[in-house]
Amino acid sequence: MTILTFERIVPVGVDRILLSTLVYRSPEEVFPYVQAFTNYPRYTEHLEDVTVHGDGGVGSRYDLRFAWWKLTYTARSRVTDISNPQSLEWRLTNSIDARGEWRIEAEPESAPVGEETASRVYFEAVYDPHTADTSSLSLPRFVSLDWVIRKVQPKLVGEAETVVERLVADIEGRRRPVELKVHETP
C-alpha cells in the first residue's frame, strides 16, 4: 500500500486551498471525472466554458473562461503530471502564479453501510494573488487589482467547495449531503 503525503512547503505570501470529501466509488471510477475538464462549467456558475488543446494527457492545455461581476478572465492551464488513478496536477500558464492537484485515495473502510467502497478526493490550489498580470484583466475604471483580490479571495473557497459537491453528485449519479473537510484556506 502506498501512503501519499500532502504536506507541501508553501512560500510566504502564497495562498493555499486544500479540501477533501468522500466519494462512494473507487479511484478508478473517480479519476475520469477529475480529468474531464470540459465538464467543469457544470460544477460552478463562474466558469463559462473550457477549450481543450490536446488529448487530456500530460501537456494538454485548457483555456478556462471565467466571468464574475464586471470581469471576464481566461485562465490558461496545462496538465503537468498524471498518475492515473491517484493524481492529476496542473499549472496556470498565464497571468498568475498558480498550480494545483486533484488527488484520489482509496478509503474503503470509510464506506457507509450499503456502499461497496469509498475514496477520498482532495482538491488543492496554491497561488500567489499578487502575481496577477493586470494587463490580462479588463478592470473597470477606478477598480484596483487589490480590491479585486480582496473580493475574489473569499469566493475561491466557496467555489472550490461547490465544484467538489457537484463533482461528487456527477460521479455518484445522485445528489446527497457532502461533508467537505477543509484542511487549509487563505
Image (cartoon, rainbow, N blue to C red):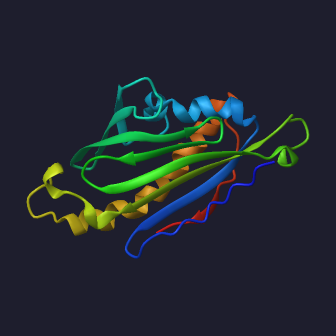
What residue occupies the far left of the structure in this picture? 141
**Count of numbered circles on the image:** 0
Question: Could you tell me residue 8's position as x and y percent?
Answer: 55, 65
Q: Nearer the viewer, residue 87 or 110?
A: 87
Q: Residue at x 56, y 59 (%)?
A: 18
Q: In which image quadrant can residue 170 be found?
A: top right
Quarter of the image for residue 117 reads top right
Vertical side of 78 occupied by 8: above or below: below
Q: Nearer the viewer, residue 36 or 71?
A: 36
Q: Residue at x 91, y 41 (%)?
A: 113
Q: Is residue 165 visible?
A: yes
Q: Is residue 174 visible?
A: no
In the displayed structure, does residue 148 sit left or right of residue 112? left
User: Is residue 123 shown above or below 5?
Assistant: above
Query: Is 119 on the left or on the right of 100, as rendered?
Result: right
The residue most toward the bottom is 12
* Location of residue 179 in the rendering, given as x and y in whole percent from the top left corner: 69, 53
57 over 100 or under it: above or below: above
Q: Is residue 9 left or right of residue 65?
A: right
Task: Provide residue 25's location: percent of width, then percent of height.
Answer: 75, 34
Residue under the point 13% across and 53% down: 135
